[in-house]
Image (cartoon, rainbow, N blue to C red):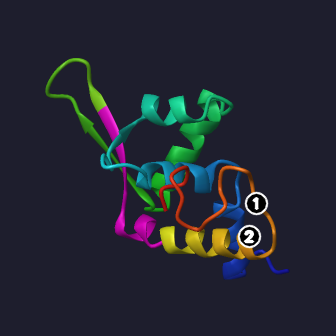
Amino acid sequence: MNTNCTIYKTLDFLGKKWTFLIILELHKGENKHKRYSEIKKKFPEITPKILSQRLKELEQNQIIIKTTDASKFPIKTEYTLTKSGLEIIPIIKSIKSWALKNNIKSKHCTETDCEHCEL
């Protein structure tokens, strides 16, 4: 496949380990603004270096917005999905639906809309 192909470039970016999970975590819950420490807490297996790298990549690709409030101490930095980032959520739902139809399941996730994914 040609490395200039749109599919190749998209999967090269989104297919990196943790990327979809970080996007999904930013979508979960009522608070759509999450701090680095909140994201890290959800994924104890991810190294700080990789989490920082994935967040930077997501920001560079305009999937998330990083906002920093330096008006008080400690400085508060939060990450939020952009409109483009929100458009990925139905894609994740479709992937999960496909997986469920093809018996790629876990004991926790047996439906497209579940409490663990909060899709």
Query: Residue 11 shows which numbered tag?
Result: none
Element type where label 1 sits in the image: loop
Camera-near label (1 vs 2) is 1
State left or right for residue 62 relative to residue 97: left
Q: Amino acid at mark 1?
A: Lys
Give the magenta part as a residue range.
77-87
The correct choice, above or below, for 89 with respect to 70 in the image is below
Which circle's residue, 1 or 2, is located before the other in the chain?
2
Q: Are marks 1 and 2 in contact (CB under 8 Å)?
A: yes
Image point (74%, 76%), residue name: 101
Element type where label 2 sits in the image: helix
State left or right for residue 101 relative to residue 54: right
Q: Quadrant of the N terminus?
A: bottom right
Q: Quadrant of residue 87?
A: bottom left
Q: Residue furthest right?
A: 1
Query: Residue 99 shows which numbered tag?
Result: 2
Instruction: Kindly tell me whether residue 10 is visible in this rendering.
Output: no
Q: Residue furthest left?
A: 71
Image point (54%, 49%), residue name: 22
In the rendering, at what x and y percent does residue 108 appear?
66, 50
The correct choice, above or below, for 101 with respect to 76 in the image is below
What is the distance, in whole Å, between disc 1 and disc 2 at their CAs?
A: 7 Å
Q: Is residue 84 magenta?
A: yes
Image point (35%, 69%), residue name: 83
In the rendering, at what x and y percent does residue 56 appear?
51, 46
Q: Amino acid at mark 2?
A: Ala
Which residue bears the numbered disc 1? 105
Q: Quadrant of residue 103?
A: bottom right
Q: Is residue 119 magenta?
A: no
In the rendering, at what x and y percent does residue 76 appear?
28, 29
